[in-house]
Image (spheres, rainbow, N blue to C red):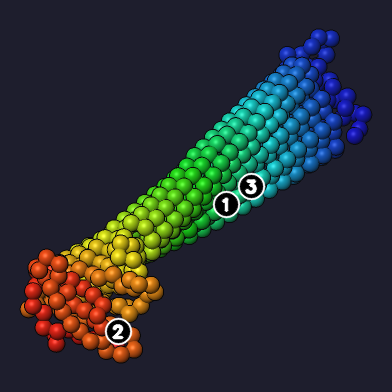
Amino acid sequence: MSTAALLFGIALLLGGGGGGSSTSGYQDGTTGDDTLTGSDDDDLIYGDRGDDVIRGLGGDDRLLGEGGRDLLEGGLGDDTLRGGEWNDTLLGGSGADRLYGEVGNDSIEGNGGNDLLNGGPGSDRLWGGLGSDTLMGGDSNDALYGGIGNDLLDGGNGDDVLDGEAGDDELYGQDGDDDLYGGGGRDFLSGGDGNDALHGGEFHDSLNGGNGNDYLGGGSGKDVLLGGDGRDSLHGDAGNDTLYGEGGWDYLVGGDGNDVLLGGFGNDTLEGNEGDDILAGGEGSDQLDGGAGNDSLAGESGADWLIGADGNDTLSGGVGSDTLEGGDGNDLLEGGEGDDILLDSAGVDLLDGGEGDDSLSAAGESTMLGGDGDDTLYSARHVVEATAGRATMDAGDGDDLLNSNGGDTMTGGDGADTFHFRDFRGGPGPDPYAMSVVTDFDPATDHLSIEADGYPPTLTSGPNADGTGTIIYADGVAVVDIQGVTVIDLDTITIVV
């Protein structure tokens, strides 16, 4: 640095002499590497070309680095710093500062006050510091850190990293594959275009993936996650969260808490996990798994697969040929429209096939309603004790097939129905088989069949206890009580070996 350049700068800072403090100092550097220092007044300092160090000190200063790799320090007051070309470092100070990196890969720190940081072209690093700051990355791949306060971070174009840190922040990734971190506070994160990763952090956050194949993690708190278009992965994590898959084939996981998961368009996978969750597949062929808790699952449109798992669950297939699995607990399964498959394994359950040719299978003390269509109903459990695990079947309209393992009450409804009885020789103990009951057998249209393991049984019949029906025996075992019919032609019964 030349002595002439330094003296020239000091003379201009003093406003041409006069011995007093100027209200507005002015300095203009040279083409070399200058060190220029302002005053406590409102200074205007140009670095010009070269790698300059410019300090504003007190007052509302304007510092312009121009060419070169410059260091600009605003100091006290509400300052405006412009780095110019090349890779500059801008430090704001305690006031409400405006810092512009401009061309180059710049490092910008707002420090105290409510600051505006604009990286401009180049791969920039911005730190808001204290206060409610606005950080703008510009083009290229930038990193923005809000610091303490309620900040606004805008990554601009490029693959950016945005971290709101402490405070209630707004983060906008814009174009590019961005990583957004809300940090502490109630934050809003928007990924924009590109394949983004959004992390909510603590408290109640709102995340919007935008276009692209995005990852959204709510973190702690009661969060709202919107996947947007693309194949997105949404994770509510802890708290009572709401997840919207929206467009694309999405993967939604509620995590802990009582969550709401809405798949939207596309073939989505929804997992409630812990808590009492609400899952709705939307359009497309979706897979829904409630997990632990008392969950409500709705497939809506498409050929859906619904799994209640643990808890007392409600499953509704909606439109389409759906598969519903209740799992453990006392469940309600509704097939809706279409040819549905309804399965339940344990508990006191209600299965309603609805419209279509449905297949219903349940174990335990369940009620099965076939509804419209030609339905098939299975009592999946062999009853050893006369009072255990009885199923109630009402096939409804259509030509239905009702299958019993013993101990069931069966109603065929309208149509030509078949009542099939299995495993009458199975089961240990003195009462190996519990007799079933048929409430509405019509010899003119309905049919009976008995399945025997190994060899054909000998069939006999006799009146039931009140004399209003007929009991069919196979090898002396009471298989079924045909109520309302006093005479049965045993030759019309089909034997399946």
Residue 98: quadrant of the picture: top right
Q: Nearer the viewer, residue 29 or 215?
A: 215
Which residue is located at x 76 percent, y 13 percent? Answer: 22
The amino acid type of the residue labelled 3 equals Val
Q: On the rendered structure, is 30 left or right of 210? A: right
Q: Disc 3, disc 2: CB below 8 Å?
A: no
Q: Position of residue 182 (x, y in %)?
A: 59, 40
The C terminus - image quarter: bottom left
* Secondary structure of residue under mark 1: strand
The correct choice, above or below, for 303 with respect to 66 in the image is below
Q: Quick one: SS at disc 2?
A: loop
24 lies above or below 211: above
Who's the residue at 52% across and 47% down the image? 256
Q: Residues within 10 Å of mark 3 (few under 14, many from 20)?
A: many
Figure check: 232 above or below 375:
above
Mark pair 2, 1: CA separation: 61 Å
Residue sitting at the far right: 3
Residue tagged 1? 197
Residue at horizontal 31%, vertical 73%?
433
Tell me if I can see residue 395 in this picture: no
Measured as percent of width and height from the top left, residue 459 is found at 20, 84
- Can I make out residue 114 in this image? yes
Disc 3 to disc 1, C-alpha distance: 10 Å
Label 3 to label 2, Cα distance in Å? 70 Å
Residue 45 picture location, percent across and down: 75, 27
Pick the quarter of the image with the N terminus: top right
Mark 2, residue position:
452
139 vs 248, nearest the viewer = 248
Q: Position of residue 16 (x, y in %)?
A: 81, 16
